[in-house]
């Protein structure tokens, strides 16, 4: 790129006018600082008026820094003329810099740098640092540079885009000639292989997908660096001077280059806006900036899809385009190098496929015999992917290029063709990594054309902190996890699902349900209900019979039922199981729903799945399965209580009288709700506490619970008003996150409360000292004369500030026979639970259990309540409580603490 392309350069910086100020005796640093500030303001105003002019802004920024460097150089050297070239590298050399990019300079000399050269370099660097410019710099001789470029691929790549800014250009010309002859010549294959390995490592570091919802614009998969890598390779192999020259080099077609150019311009615009908003070199497009950039770039809301979601969908479509271009670019390059005996791609197979149906193999990759092979018979657009899945073959980029081009041939006729649908189902239900082939279908545009409803969610993000991937990527990952479970590869993580998947009647029902469970997102309305309607229409086309179609539709409609019930309701309450089983109706549906729920949660993103969720889902499944299998619970309430008490007697080795006394103190709800291992631990804790007669200190036990993967906090102390609030406040003050709680009162007025907590990383407290700290925090909160204030919390993160969650309260009076179930939805924050419990206690109500779930920035806290007299809440109680909880949920606890 030529810096002459910059429009109205003197409005950005007038070098002659500034040089004149130097001669007038002004302070050099101050003059340059004002010039830099004025230039940045001019560039910012230009991109503000033309939000899509990011590349022009990047070029203007490079021009501004060029002039600053030249002026600084002239001020430092004065009237001397050192044999020194000041060279821009990387983006500085290419002539494209984001507003806060580093300035990458090399001080280049023909011979070993002299003391004078070192002094000039130091003086210039100090001057630039005074201007708050971050400078990457080096001082090299010609010999040093060539030697380093031979051994260090980073140096070689940086110098590939080198450009003289000022100084003695003959030095630069000489070293560039040597670089081409001594370094570049004959090393194309080596360079390409190194750049591809570097790209792969970078992708892994950035998440190895284009579809993370907070992408890195510069380094992420499908971002600017991937485009730069194509340009570097083209420049190294063919000596291209501009990215447009990739067409004449035979690496891209004119149409493909237009896609390259469109993506590059878009990403430069996003990157420049991101830098300007952050006021620094920020490359991660975080939630806190997405909404602002969508507004700046003039995206508007549409029914069912917000402006920020439309902006991010266009971002991901461009990232997808970069991936497509990379594939065809590398295929062309491989062919070119192959003619010279320097192929860099080495995929191969050690067997022959059974049959290729007219397709061919190109060094182990599935390809097409002629350019028009897919166009001549559009059915082959599906067949090639089915063949790849069946034979576990990689598809050659040449064939992918043709599939991408010819995907437009997919219309109603092909979509209704039973053969095409059979090919699609073969891919979808393949046990051999179907996610890989589905991703290829998606990249080529075949997936969205063949299943138009899926095409509507391609590259669609969900603007929240819970979902880590776009809707299409989430669904494809879920299918991959399903196949991995069926292959037995996730037996340790998901033993129940691994066992159940062998028992289901129809594999394809499960795979189709996983594909369709989120297919109606972004349309407005309930995506589960809309998705169920889509399933009824689509499944017959895919070859499913009426019974299978009905089951898929039901699974899509209720795909959140199991998780929402297990995570938000008291599964020890018989009414919870009754209501759930009334909807599920059959053991087969229950098995399918459990597996669908597992892969759905696992595919949301890393760290979303944990042992606690596994434990809740398993407990829920087992209770429901027993009810469905027998038509009733195998053991009645009284029988189960008696069995639990006998299990305790066998474990603690107490006298029959002591066991009977302990059992009599606790209500039946305790014996039904708590796991036997907790009941045993509680009994020993109570016995130890009561052995210390006269000790007024509360008994607090903190131990790790292997089954749930969390830490159990058990509190035994005299019951009193606001007790549970004190416990919550103490734990919140110590930094613990409560995920579940059950509150019990003995018949003689003691409280026995069991809570599960996790640390700030979502893990149990493995350090014994930290568990001791939790216990002390609760003890202090319980022993204080007055209830502790709400803990002072840290300021919300910039990410969470990007979201507004309006607090809401839902009352489910029929969800329990004995209690009123209150569900609070609010923006998650530390000490939220403490604030809510304070409001409940202030209204005079008793909490019997609390269940806490978080979904990114949103918290869902569910309480099972009664009035102080043990009765359900009245309408008047509910109205007052609703107002109090909405106020507490929306109130910032930092303000209260202050």
Image: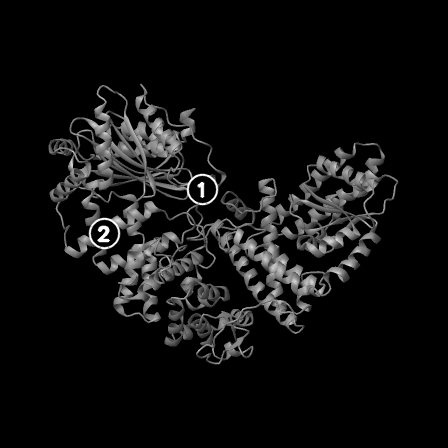
Q: Quadrant location of the C terminus?
A: top left
Considering the numbered disc 2 on the image, is that residue within a helix, a strand or a loop? helix
Q: Which secondary structure lies at badge 1?
A: loop
Coloring scheme used: one colour
Query: Where does label 2 land, which residue?
Result: 622
Q: Is residue 884 visible?
A: yes
Q: Give percent across and percent down for residue 506.
A: 28, 66
Disc nearest the viewer among 2 and 1: 2
331 displayed left or right of 429? right
Numbered circle sitting on residue 228: none
Task: Indicate the quadrant where residue 763 lies.
Answer: top left
Image coordinates for residue 634, horizontal then vertical, percent: 14, 51
Residue 178 appears left or right of 228: right
Residue 261 showing in the rendered view: no
Q: Is residue 610 left or right of residue 188?
A: left
Say which label, 2 or 1, has the lower sequence index.
Answer: 2
In front: 551, or 202? 202
Label 1, on which residue? Answer: 803
Q: Closest to the observer: 50 or 870?
A: 870
Kindly indicate whether the residue at mark 1 contacts the one at mark 2 (C-beta within 8 angstroms).
no
Q: Position of residue 36 (x, y in %)?
A: 71, 39
**Relative to 694, is 266 above or below?**
below
Quadrant occupied by the N terminus = bottom right
Q: Please give the name of the residue rendered at 29% of the width and 56% of the height, measured from the top-left corner.
A: 593
Residue ID at (88%, 40%): 79
Q: Position of residue 114 (x, y in %)?
A: 83, 43
In space, the residues marked 2 and 1 are separated at their CA atoms by 37 Å
């Amino acid at each position: 790129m030529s810096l002459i392309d910059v429009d109205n350069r003197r409005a950005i910086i007038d070098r002659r006018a500034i040089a004149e100020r130097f001669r007038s005796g002004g302070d050099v640093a101050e003059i340059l600082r004002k010039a830099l500030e004025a230039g940045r303001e001019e560039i910012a105003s230009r991109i503000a008026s033309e939000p899509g002019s990011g590349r022009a802004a990047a070029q203007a920024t490079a021009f501004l820094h060029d002039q600053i460097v030249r002026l600084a150089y002239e001020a430092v050297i004065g009237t001397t003329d050192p044999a020194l070239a000041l060279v821009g590298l990387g983006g500085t050399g290419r002539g494209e810099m984001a507003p806060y990019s580093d300035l990458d300079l090399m001080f280049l000399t023909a011979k070993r740098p002299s003391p004078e050269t070192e002094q000039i370099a130091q003086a210039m660097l100090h001057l630039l640092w005074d201007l708050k410019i971050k400078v990457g710099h080096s001082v090299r001789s010609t010999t040093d540079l060539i030697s380093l470029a031979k051994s260090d691929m980073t140096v070689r790549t940086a110098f590939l885009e080198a450009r003289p800014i000022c100084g003695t250009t003959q030095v630069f010309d000489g070293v560039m000639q040597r670089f081409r002859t001594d370094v570049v010549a004959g090393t194309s294959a080596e360079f390409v292989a190194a750049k591809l390995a570097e790209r792969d490592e970078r992708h892994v570091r950035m998440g190895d997908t284009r579809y993370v919802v907070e992408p890195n614009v510069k380094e992420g998969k499908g971002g600017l660096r991937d485009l730069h890598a194509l340009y570097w390779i083209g420049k190294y192999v063919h000596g291209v001077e501009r990215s447009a020259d990739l067409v004449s080099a035979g690496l891209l077609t004119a149409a493909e280059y237009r896609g390259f150019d469109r993506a590059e311009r878009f990403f430069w615009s996003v990157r420049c806006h991101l830098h300007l908003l952050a006021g620094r070199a920020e490359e991660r497009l975080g939630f806190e900036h997405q909404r602002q950039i969508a507004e700046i770039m003039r995206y508007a809301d549409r029914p069912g899809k917000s402006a920020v979601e439309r902006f991010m969908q266009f971002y991901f479509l461009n990232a997808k385009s970069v991936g497509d271009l990379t594939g065809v670019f590398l295929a062309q390059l491989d062919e070119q190098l192959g003619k010279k005996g320097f192929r860099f791609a080495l995929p191969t197979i050690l067997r022959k496929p059974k049959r290729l149906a007219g397709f061919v193999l190109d060094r182990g990759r599935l390809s097409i015999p002629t350019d028009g092979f897919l166009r001549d018979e559009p059915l082959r657009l599906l067949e090639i992917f089915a063949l790849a899945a069946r034979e576990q073959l990689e598809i050659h980029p040449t064939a992918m290029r043709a599939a991408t081009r010819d995907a437009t041939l997919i219309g109603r006729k092909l979509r209704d063709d039973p053969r095409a649908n059979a090919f699609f189902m073969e891919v979808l239900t393949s046990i051999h990594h179907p996610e890989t082939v589905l991703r290829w279908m998606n990249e080529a545009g075949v997936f969205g054309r063949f299943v138009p409803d899926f095409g509507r969610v391609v590259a669609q993000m969900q603007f929240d902190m819970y979902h880590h991937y776009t809707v299409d990527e989430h669904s494809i990952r879920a299918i991959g996890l399903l196949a991995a479970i069926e292959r037995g590869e996730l037996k340790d993580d998901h033993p129940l699902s691994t066992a159940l998947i062998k028992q289901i009647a129809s594999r394809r029902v499960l795979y189709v349900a996983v594909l369709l469970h989120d297919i109606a997102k972004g349309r407005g309305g309930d995506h589960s209900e809309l998705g169920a309607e889509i399933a009824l229409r689509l499944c017959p086309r895919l070859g499913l019979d009426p019974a299978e179609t009905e089951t898929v539709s039901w699974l899509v409609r209720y795909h959140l039922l199991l998780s929402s019930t297990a995570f938000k309701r008291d599964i020890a309450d018989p009414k919870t199981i009754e209501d759930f089983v009334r909807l599920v109706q059959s053991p087969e549906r229950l098995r399918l729903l459990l597996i669908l729920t597992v892969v759905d949660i696992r595919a949301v993103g890393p760290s979303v799945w944990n042992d606690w969720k596994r434990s809740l889902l398993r407990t829920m499944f087992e209770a429901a399965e027993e009810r469905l299998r027998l038509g009733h619970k195998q053991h009645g309430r009284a029988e189960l209580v008696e069995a639990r008490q006998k299990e305790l007697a066998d474990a603690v080795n107490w006298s029959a009288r002591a066991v009977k006394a302990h059992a009599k103190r606790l209500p039946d709800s305790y014996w039904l709700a708590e796991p036997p291992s907790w009941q045993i631990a509680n009994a020993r804790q109570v016995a130890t506490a009561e052995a210390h007669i006269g000790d007024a200190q509360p008994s607090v036990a903190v131990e790790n619970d292997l089954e749930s993967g969390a830490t159990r906090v058990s509190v035994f102390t005299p019951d009193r008003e606001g007790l549970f609030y004190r416990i919550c406040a103490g734990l919140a003050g110590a930094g613990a996150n409560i995920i579940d709680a059950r509150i019990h009162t003995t018949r003689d007025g003691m409280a026995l409360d069991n809570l599960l907590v996790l640390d700030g990383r979502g893990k149990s407290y493995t350090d014994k000292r930290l568990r001791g700290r939790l216990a002390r925090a609760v003890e202090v909160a319980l022993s204080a004369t007055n209830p502790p204030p709400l803990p002072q919390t840290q300021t919300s993160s910039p990410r969470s500030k990007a979201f507004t969650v309006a607090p809401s309260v839902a009352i489910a009076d029929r969800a329990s026979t004995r209690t009123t179930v209150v569900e609070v939805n609010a923006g998650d924050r530390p000490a939220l639970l403490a604030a809510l419990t304070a409001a409940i206690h202030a209204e005079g109500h008793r909490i019997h259990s609390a269940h806490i779930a978080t979904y990114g920035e949103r918290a869902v806290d569910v309480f099972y309540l009664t009035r102080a007299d043990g009765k359900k809440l009245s309408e008047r109680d509910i109205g007052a409580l609703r107002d109090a909880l909405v106020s507490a949920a929306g109130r910032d606890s930092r303000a209260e603490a202050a």
